[in-house]
Amino acid sequence: MLTTGKKDKIKISNNRYRLNYHIMGPSGWINDPNGLSYFNGYYHVFFQHHPYSADWGPMHWGHVRSKDLIHWESLPIALFPDTSQDSDGCFSGSAIVVDNKLYLMYTGHLLSDPNDPDSYTQSQNIAVSTDGINFRKSEYNPVIPTPPEDNDKDFRDPKIWYINNQWFSVIGSKNMNGFGRVLLYSSKNLRAWSYLGPLAEAKNVDAEGYVWECPDFFELDGSNVLIVSPQGMKPQGNKYKNLFQTGYFVGDFDYNTMNFSHNTFSELDHGHDFYAPQTFQAPDGRRILFGWMNMWESDMPEKEDGWAGALTFPRELHLVNNKMHMKPIDEIQQLRTHKIAEGNYSQYKSIVLPDHSAEYLGTFDANSDVQVCIKTIENHEVFNLEILSESNQASLQKYNDPEPRVASLNLGKKFDIHILIDSSSAEIFINSGEVVFTERFYDEHDLFIETSTKETDFQINVFQLATK
């Protein structure tokens, strides 16, 4: 085992942007959600974590758990970069429960030259726990020591599952020609793994990316879904405006031939601050997703206060006509302390949102344009959301981006807008989660929300949500 010396964790110097009901690190940097699972009566969420500064650094696995997906208990760091397989980082991975043990599968990151961040190699490793808190790294690590011969060195972020008396894992990667892809492996004992070939891969670098990170593969509503986070995709009209993207393929997977036939790539979230999501199946059968609620090019002003990064509120997933819908889990109702506004309104309504912790639910006629604008008390626009009935589009204008984010909708006679505000974040769900915008914002002034329509009435309910 390597020894790294004792370090002091960074401390929080200001709580101004700290979130009330989202997962954050106790201090320091966090990014990707990892190891989502349910074990011994608790939901477990791990995350990429650098506890010694508010910047990205050698990755640890931070850890929280919850009985209800709402109230989270901070636990000791689960994985440290402290072995010869992972001394420069325990990168992203996933979890599986087998025989009353919680197994983590993660990527070990090594640098041959500490001064050259591109001098890395990556391998896949296992850690195990009997209590869900303390983890022991496997003596068989690395269980997948190298990528296949036709692969580049980018080889990370395993997602593991169990079916037909076998364990399977998908791993994010790219081939030797620089095209992003996802690799498929299987094992009968979690120690020896067989390479089964690419599950899916890019055909065009500009359109689909040069490396695919954080793959997730699962069944949902009768289909198989592959979520990936590609790097290197070029913007296409209103699509793919972030530095890196996240999207999904829907298709059918044959466990006899190991063939995944699928449709084209679709963007999962149209906001500025969403990347590297992971899902798991809750005990009641729901497929639930968490994502990193930031993006690599984001400013992250909270760094000044000793922390950076947060995870999205948990979202329930469904497929509707092969299109992913995401909505906040129903447990959000536990956070409601009282109702700020309720009723039917004609054309315009303005409501103050105290404490930057609120939930907005609106129902609208689909034949009328709708505008929902979040402003500061000094009349500075933070977000301006427009639903354009004639073009069936949602357009979100953010205060620090001159270009709106635009997404298509399939509107029926009525549609809903569901917004979660939490201190320095906003998650906007439109038409039962058909279109989602995930955003971070930084303004300490009081907020209010204005709703307006052309000629038609609308119904809204606004709740105050619990604060810390």
Image (cartoon, rainbow, N blue to C red):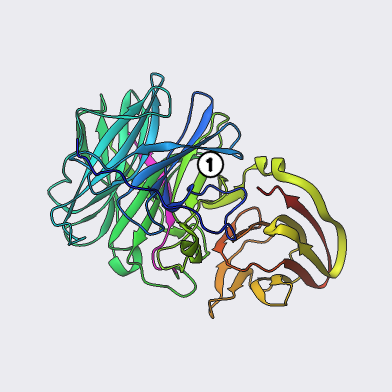
The secondary structure type at the circle numbered 1 is strand
Q: Residue at x 33, y 23 (%)?
A: 165
- Residue 434 percent location from the top left of the image: 59, 56
393 on left or right of 42: right
- Residue 461 percent location from the top left of the image: 79, 55
Residue type at mark 1 is Ile
Find disc 1 in the rendering and name its residue.
288
10 Å crowding of disc 1: few (<14), some (14-19), many (20+): many
Q: Nearer the viewer, residue 306 or 397?
A: 306
Q: Nearer the viewer, residue 242 or 352?
A: 352
* Residue 415 visible within the image: no
Q: Nearer the viewer, residue 262 or 209?
A: 209
Q: Quadrant of residue 425?
A: bottom right
Q: Residue at x 58, y 73 (%)?
A: 398
Q: Nearer the viewer, residue 345 or 82?
A: 82
**Can residue 254 be found in the magenta stretch?**
yes
* Residue 34 visible within the image: yes
**Can residue 259 be found in the magenta stretch?**
no
Q: Quadrant of the N terminus?
A: top left
Q: Residue at x 66, y 41 (%)?
A: 330
* Residue placed furthest toward the top: 99
- Residue 257 percent location from the top left of the image: 28, 37
In the displayed structure, 415 sits above or below 67; it is below
104 on left or right of 372: left
In magenta, the rendered stretch is 242-255
